[in-house]
Amino acid sequence: MSAGHHLTVDGIWKSYGHDTFVVRDVSFTVEPGEFVTLLGPSGSGKTSTLMMIAGFETPTRGSIRVDGQDIAGKPPEQRNFGIVFQGYALFPHMNVLENVGFPLRMRGIATRDRRRRAAEMLEKVDLSAFAHRRPYELSGGQQQRVALARALVFDPNALLLDEPLGALDRKLREQLQLEIKEIQRRVGISILLVTHDQDEAMMLSDRIAVMSEGEIVQIGTPADLYLHPATAFVAGFLGETNFLPAVCRGLEGNLLTVELTSGAIAHARPPRNGATPPPGAPTLLAIRPERLRLLQPQETADSVIEATAISSVFLGRHARTTLSAEGQTLIISTTDWPTLPAGTTLRLGWSSDDAQCLAHSDHRRP
């Protein structure tokens, strides 16, 4: 997205039948040069949201604006968005240069200028040497870069990506994730990505909007969502998480004091959405496996509980241990302990800043 342009989605709803909404009151912005991802499981409304932005679906209500101008009523060809789907839809009878230049041809750009601009875009995606090959002569990753070049060649306001790497194997997908980020750096365009792949969202995004049941549950940076989720759904969907049921006892400074099932007292950050729960209110503590610590006999921590090892696996860079504690099955990932025999009794600890209290009204887990 060129300087000074903003994409704003404001309160859009989408219904395909009476009182049945697949998207409900979705609002977010994409700033110039920003990479934003709509992340969620199948049926969460993320693709329907993208289709409304692209112009292939019409919002039931709400607005979509570029630079303050509402484009919700315009057809796709008048929205100036580059779009890449999972199926790249390259023309098999055209070579790579002709495929990339096709959007310019449809805009009436002269042949010489069209070829020049297509060649410049192929250079930006490192495909100049393949300009005269046909799509069937390219690998899946090369075809994906051709599709990206074609979506960028006409200088769109933003690039919309709908699961563009979903058909590729893991190694190639990870390689192309890095290439997409590098292409964005070279071109300087804003990107809106739809994906259900948490790792992909974490690697590529400046901000992630987590969607569930047609709504945005939480939006923020990858680090903020991972370390401080607002709900159990976000905590469980965005990586592996341990959940501990507790009862609130009161706020002390910036931390909430809670009582665990065993009666142990622990401390955690208060819920991100809504008011601090009153004393006696139930809550959940969300703690990432790598934030739990196996304590030495005399070692202490902000919060400490007793646990028993169930199983342990050495995975090279870390050991993954399953434990029983507080009536729950917990996972701990650690690099400084070997595997532990089943039945080993131990102590777990964590820092107060690494535990997030969740609102009890939303205990949905993916």
Image: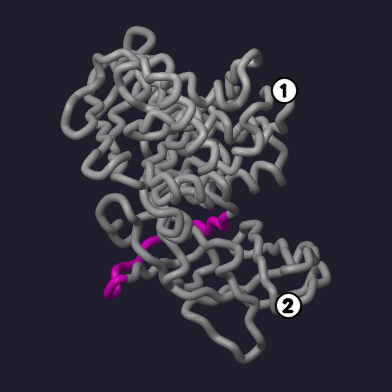
The residue that mark 1 highlights is: 136
Given this view, does label 2 or label 1 mark the residue nearer the observer? 1
Q: Which mark is residue 190?
A: none
Most foreground residue, 186 or 129:
129
Most foreground residue, 40 or 158:
158
In the structure shown, which secondary structural element does the residue marked by tag 2 occupy? loop
The residue that mark 2 highlights is: 337
**Where is residue 88 drawn, in percent x and y?**
58, 24
The reply, left or right, for residue 354 in relation to residue 340 is: left
Residue ID at (50%, 57%) = 245
From this viewpoint, which residue is outermost toward the left?
Answer: 68
| Whether residue 45 is visible | no
Residue ID at (80%, 71%) = 339
Mark 1: few/some/many CA within 10 Å (<14, 14-19, 20+):
few
Distance of mark 2 from mark 1, alpha carbons? 50 Å
Residue ID at (27%, 75%) = 253
Q: Quadrant of the C terminus?
A: top right
Sequence order check, earlier mark of 2 and 1: 1
Kind of residue indicated by mark 2:
Trp
Give the extent of the magenta segment: 241-254
| Whether residue 344 is visible | yes
Kind of residue indicated by mark 1:
Tyr
Contact (Cβ within 8 Å) of mark 2 with mark 1: no
